[in-house]
Image (cartoon, helix red, strand yellow):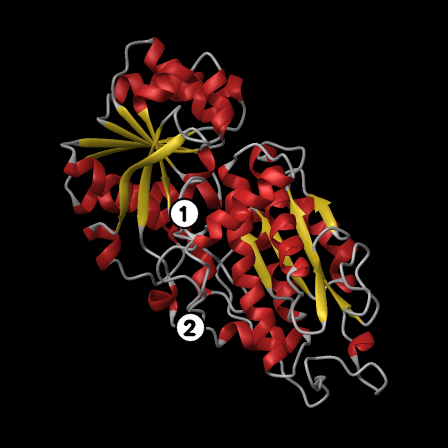
Amino acid sequence: MKTTARRVGIALTAASLVLTGCGRDDDEPGGTESVPGVTSEPCPEAVDQEKGCIYLGTITDLTGVFKGVGVPLTEGQKAFWAKVNADGGIGDYEVDVTKFTKDNQYNPDTHATVFAEIKDEILALGQSLGTAHTNTILEQVQDDSILTLPASLGSNWIFEDGVIEVGTNYCAEAMNSVDAAVDGGAKSVAAVHFPGDYGDDAMVGARIAAEANDLKFTDIPTAPGQEAQGAAVTALLKAKPDVVIVSTGPIEMAAIVGGAAAQGFTGKFIGSIPSWNAAVLESPAGPAIAGLYRQATSFGTWDSDTPGHEAMREAAAAAKQVPNDWYMIGWAGGYIMKAALEAAIEDDNLTREGLVEAAAALTGVDGEGMLPEGSGNYAGDPNERVVRATSLNKVDDKTSSKVSVDTEAFTGPTAEGYDFQEPCYLQK
């Protein structure tokens, strides 16, 4: 599903609410009771009954093809805000990300439907999973000044107002992956990918890097589903690329890597960040994945030595959460929204419009070591705003989440010099 990048101005009217103190003035007209998603009443599971509540919406995949991403991502997000609340909240408020959680079943139409159910009850969207899915509601969230944190790495977000993306986009990630393969001696590359905004974004990035490095390039789109990967495997065996950029879900990745290896394919695979889930190692394809696959990402691993990772691991242990890198990324994304909320409260303007304005003024975010370098510069133009670094993880049974860093964060020459003028997937 394609959408063009839109720039919708944020309408700041004289009727916008300006709140005093730390953002609460419940006895005056225009206090928090008039702001969607902000109330003087405590959150349903409040730590401090004297604090008000900020409600953030969550639209994720709990039952669809990316439930292996959506479920732990959402749990990590919940854990982050639980810690924020336990540590005193934000100003006079605690934050709730549970009450207005909806399952999009990884379906864009469902995404739009469930958004309509919660849009009047939330201050902002703390998670909106899927590129095409978030695009279905983009015009409305911009019109209504609903700040949105997409659980998606489409290259379109750097062009959009009111969106606070985090991480290296699929396009730049694929550029770096191909550049790394070239350093390893690769002479040919294929991209096996879902059609649509996610897979096409990565495919175009891989193609741009292949052309920059004078590599033979093969484009292999594939449908979702484990049983649908036979044609992709056949195409790989015919093309015989040295490296394959895989931009599918984990189940499809396992079927592609395992199926190709079973028929003698010895090329290497580098998967876009959503292609990984440690559970694939328990499948029959596990040995092939361990030998042939690396994951591209812009985030650290579960065992990373940073203050943020340490706090995340403590919370996960208390909740008996099995180590999962998507849980970790859900936690990491919370720093972005927290910074925007803190800035809006500091500006005495905890309204939808005030939150969008505060986010747009951010030049960086302190993620306690969990965010990629360059994150949070929403005040910059698209090429200043974009995060370009990628690291590559290898399968490692000795680590908590079964991956460890194989190549430290780097920015290859293709991504370093690329001028982002439009979303990559529009160049399909």
Above or below 330: residue 192: above
Above or below 340: residue 324: above
Side of 287 where 1 appears, left or right: right
Above or below 124: residue 307: above
Residue 120, by quadrant, is bottom right
User: How many residues crowd mark 2 within 10 Å: few (<14), some (14–19), many (20+)?
Assistant: some
Above or below 230: residue 195: below
Amino acid found under the numbered disc labelled 2: Thr
User: How many residues crowd mark 1 within 10 Å: few (<14), some (14–19), many (20+)?
Assistant: many
- Determine the residue positioned at 83% across, 81% down: 26
Q: Give x and y (percent) for residue 58.
A: 67, 51
Q: Give x and y (percent) for residue 66.
A: 57, 35
- Determine the residue positioned at 65% across, 83% down: 348
Please state which of residues 157 and 350 is positioned toward the viewer in this rendering: 350
Q: Give x and y (percent) for residue 361.
A: 48, 77
Side of 19 where 6 appears, left or right: left
**Residue that label 2 marks:** 363
Visible residue check, residue 9: no
Q: Give x and y (percent) for residue 1.
A: 54, 45
Residue 221, by quadrant, is top left
**Residue that label 1 marks:** 299
User: What secondary structure is found at the residue carrying circle 2?
Assistant: loop
User: What secondary structure is found at the residue carrying circle 1?
Assistant: loop
Please state which of residues 281 and 103 is positioned toward the viewer in this rendering: 281
Visible residue check, residue 140: yes
Side of 121 where 152 appears, left or right: left
- Determine the residue positioned at 38% across, 55% down: 372
Amino acid found under the numbered disc labelled 1: Phe
